[in-house]
Amino acid sequence: MTRNDVFYAKILLNGLVEVMRGRYIMDIRGLGAHMPIGKGFHVAPELVVDIGGNAFQIFPHSPRSWKGRIPTSGEAEKFNSAMSRFGIDYDNAFVHSGYLVNLAAPSDETYEKSINCMILEIEICAALGLKYLNVHPGSHRGEGEKFGIARIQKALDRILEETQHHNVMILLEIVAPKGGNLGYTIEQLSIMRNGCSHPERIGITFDTCHGFDAGYDITSEDGVKRLLDEIERYVGLENLKMIHLNDSKYPLGAGKDRHEFIGQGYIGDEGFATFFSFEEIRKIPWILETPGGIEEYRRDIQRVKEILKKIR
Ligand code: ZN
Ligand code: MN
Ligand code: MN
């Protein structure tokens, strides 16, 4: 080989590497963020595409209120046409339950309100044609885990019973172990799921910040393998429907639930690169719930893409 040959071979090789790197970006199922609904549900698809995403999550109503309203057929039509105009797959669109809902609440009043609120939220999902309602399972508020888990199972049964005519799946989100929160391990989520009469209508969400808070070290290959093994063993990988992609302001196992911008917390760019290197993870839509608003999300989506480019 002449010097020239080597020179051109290098250019060719570089080009191939770039193509391969590009392929990894195309290779992911979905990437997006939690979108505001103040101007209506129909703005979410356009907003998320504008910031470089193809997946989103929304609240079904003001998250600090018990009240919500089923969208009119006109509103639903507007939403559905935005979904197709901006090319969002319904498997990449999620609804997050309100903050007041606590399916483990010791107070009967809060418990009943929570059940009714989630029934309404499922009806809102169904009206919009959305398939997934994500919820934090709940907090026993000092009454103990056994009490709380039994309460959650009964609540899920009642909610699923009331909404059996709707094709909406409930996603139990892994939470940080603090304040009596239940569902901080995959096994715990599976106990809730298997304890009710329609487990096939219950999936799970893995939040990287909450999981890290609970001791799932996704910054190491062994840690990701352990996580995937647990998911497969307890609920089946096909029931992992969403990943909440958040960095963590606190170290592994801290149990603080403080989300950080991608790459700026204890998971870090390298940690996410390890996490993203697993095909099982790239098959699931990723939704950011990092601090700030639309512009911060735009920056974080870009950062995720940069991390993806570096994976070989
Ligand atoms: Zn959540
Ligand atoms: Mn989350
Ligand atoms: Mn959180």
Image (cartoon, rainbow, N blue to C red):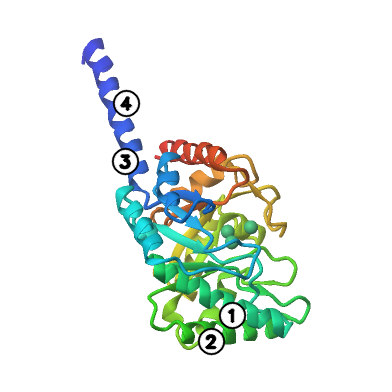
Please, is residue 290 above or below residue 66 in the view? above
The CA span between labels 4 and 1 is 56 Å
Question: Mark 2, residues whose alpha carbon is within 10 Å: few (<14), some, or many (≥20)?
Answer: some
Mark 1 or 2 closer to N-term?
Answer: 1
Q: Residue at x 54, y 60 (%)?
A: 59
**Is there a contact, CB below 8 Å, between mark 1 and mark 2?**
yes
Query: What secondary structure is marked by label 2?
Result: helix
Q: Amino acid at mark 4?
A: Asn
**Residue 166 in which image quadrant:** bottom left
Question: Mark 1, residues whose alpha carbon is within 10 Å: few (<14), some, or many (≥20)?
Answer: many
The CA span between labels 3 and 1 is 44 Å
Mark 3 or 4 closer to N-term?
Answer: 4
Please, is residue 164 above or below residue 217 in the view? below
Query: What secondary structure is marked by label 3?
Result: helix
Please, is residue 271 above or below residue 229 in the view? above
Query: What secondary structure is marked by label 4?
Result: helix
**Is there a contact, CB below 8 Å, between mark 3 and mark 4?**
no
* Residue linked to disc 3: 23
Discs 2/3, front:
2
The CA span between labels 3 and 4 is 14 Å
Discs 3/4, front:
3
Q: Residue at x 56, y 68 (%)?
A: 68
The CA span between labels 2 and 3 is 45 Å
What number is the disc on residue 158?
2
Ligand 1 image position (quadrant): bottom right
Report if residue 172 is visible in the image: yes
Q: Residue at x 24, y 17 (%)?
A: 8
Report if residue 130 is visible in the image: no
Residue closest to the far right: 142
Question: Mark 4, residues whose alpha carbon is within 10 Å: few (<14), some, or many (≥20)?
Answer: few
Query: What secondary structure is marked by label 1?
Result: helix
What number is the disc on residue 115?
1
